[in-house]
Amino acid sequence: MSQPAATLGDEPLTHILNGLRGAIVGLAIGLLAIGVLFHTEMIVAVHTWIDSTAYNHCFLIIPIVIFLIWDRRSTLAGLAAEPLPLAALLAIPLGIAWLAAERLGIMEGRQLVAVSMVEVLFLAMLGRRLWLALLGPLLYLYFLVPFGEFLTPKLQDITTWFIRHVLDILGIPAYIDGYIIDIPEGSFFVAEACAGLRFLIASIAFGVLYALLMYRSPWRRVIFIAVSIVVPIIANGFRALGIVELGHILGSAEAAAADHILYGWIFFSLVILMLIVLGLPFREDDQPDKQRPLSDHSEPGSARQGLLAGLAVALLACLGPAVVLGLNQASATPNIAMKPLDLSPACVNLGAPTTPVPAALEGTPGRTVVQRMNCGGTEMIVQIEVFSPRSTAAPINAERRRLTRPKEADDVSEVPLTTRTGGALPPWRLIRANEPAYVAVAGLWVDGKPATPGMTMRLGMARTSVFGGADAPVVVAITPVADWAKIDMRKKQDLEHRLSDLLEAHPEIGGQIQALAAAAR
């Protein structure tokens, strides 16, 4: 018996390609345009995937989406693209949202809008029915965005709260101050890396994938995704508690925490296995998807409508970047004579301050001066950077992080700087790292006034970036010079005290910074 030219297994794929014939060109044009317009968001996202273990899995998202689409091939075979050009109008509110996120300096917001532009493109190109059939795989694209770092402090609070109450139940004496847990056998610190964010994000990504593959009922999918959110949070509490309990049993906190990262990943693997086992009894993957009769029918002129829809989305997506381009032309770096800080007699300059920007700081968005000083026997580097009065919060926060946080530092925390007696020293913030040990201070002045990074600062700078401001924003960073790989906890605390003593002895620094900011008007 002869076999037909196209086997039964090939038919769905053939019909899918026939149904998308009128949309492929428009999709290609639209995706290329979105990639060019939002290339910064893409580059920053990829760097985050590489640098952060919480987002390494993002490299798998696009292959997973392709697999999810392939898994639905029998359902998609009965559908043809029905371009919906009017859907391109959704790019207008998205453009406004992108502009707001850009002015506020919220990169995650910009990245979420960029992915949403892709969703609008697919809706405009494919039409409502085909887009809804692809809704699961398309929404999975949002996992490309390295989103959720703002949850870290809350997760630290939850983990610390969990440890505190369970230690009380177990009768283990403990003194908890913030995220520091002291037991008779030593001290533990619930650092950012111990908050469980990397486990939570990976668990959610897995939970959504598992729900899309194993279930057909929307309610079962929602319930399993909710379980994949709650379980890793509780499990991370038990993981952190286990390390403290192990330190109590071994009689040494250092011995228990030696391989805590490895223990964490082993524990997380067991949690994922537990989620799989919990979900298997309710699986529905043996139920076939609803199939539609195969048809090669396509609306006359669909190719032309698809091309129009793709071009419309691309053009409307340009509005936000075009406005930003005009605003950035008015925010040139101020051309002022940079003045170093006068910290005499407490500090002695070790050579002339370097200005303009030295080689190590090339490419920075502001004007920089660097001082190397000896302050009471401790060598310190003081860096001052002045920005345009129309600058947004994004470059300022990025520079502040670059000046005060080494790339290799882990478990970084930031707290208000205080004197030895506990008095506050605004606007100075103390930046600490544990692996390796590191300490620095940073101060920020916006519109001539001391400021603290946060939403209020972002909103104010977004306003001045559009309507103009008076004084220029200024960032000051002071870092002791030390071999950080060999610094112990006692030496680190001593350096913190020397920084606070220096700034307490020189309250006039604020006036010097304000004069520098006013010179850039």
Image (cartoon, rainbow, N blue to C red):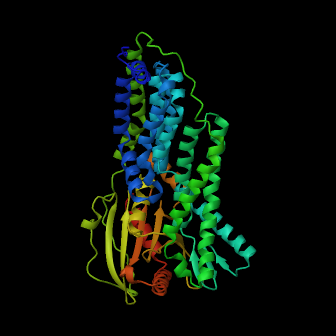
Q: Residue 243 appears at what percent x and percent y?
A: 59, 73
Residue 358 shows in this picture: no
Q: Nearer the viewer, residue 291 or 89?
A: 291
Residue positioned most to the left: 359
Q: Is residue 232 left or right of residue 72?
A: right
Which image quarter: residue 515?
bottom left
Note whether 160 is above or below 46 in the view shown.
below
Q: Is residue 114 left or right of residue 210?
A: left
Q: Residue at x 49, y 78 (%)?
A: 507
Q: Residue at x 46, y 83 (%)?
A: 492
Q: Residue 7 appears at what percent x and percent y?
A: 40, 20
Q: Nearer the viewer, residue 20 or 262?
A: 262
Q: Residue at x 53, y 27 (%)?
A: 133
Q: Residue 227 appears at what percent x and percent y?
A: 65, 49
Total residue callouts? 0
Which image quarter: residue 356?
bottom left
Point out the image quarter for the N terminus.
top left
Residue 337 shows in this picture: yes
Which image quarter: residue 339?
bottom left
Q: Residue at x 36, y 14 (%)?
A: 2
Note whether 89 is above or below 489 in the view shown.
above
Q: Residue 172 appears at what percent x and percent y?
A: 70, 80
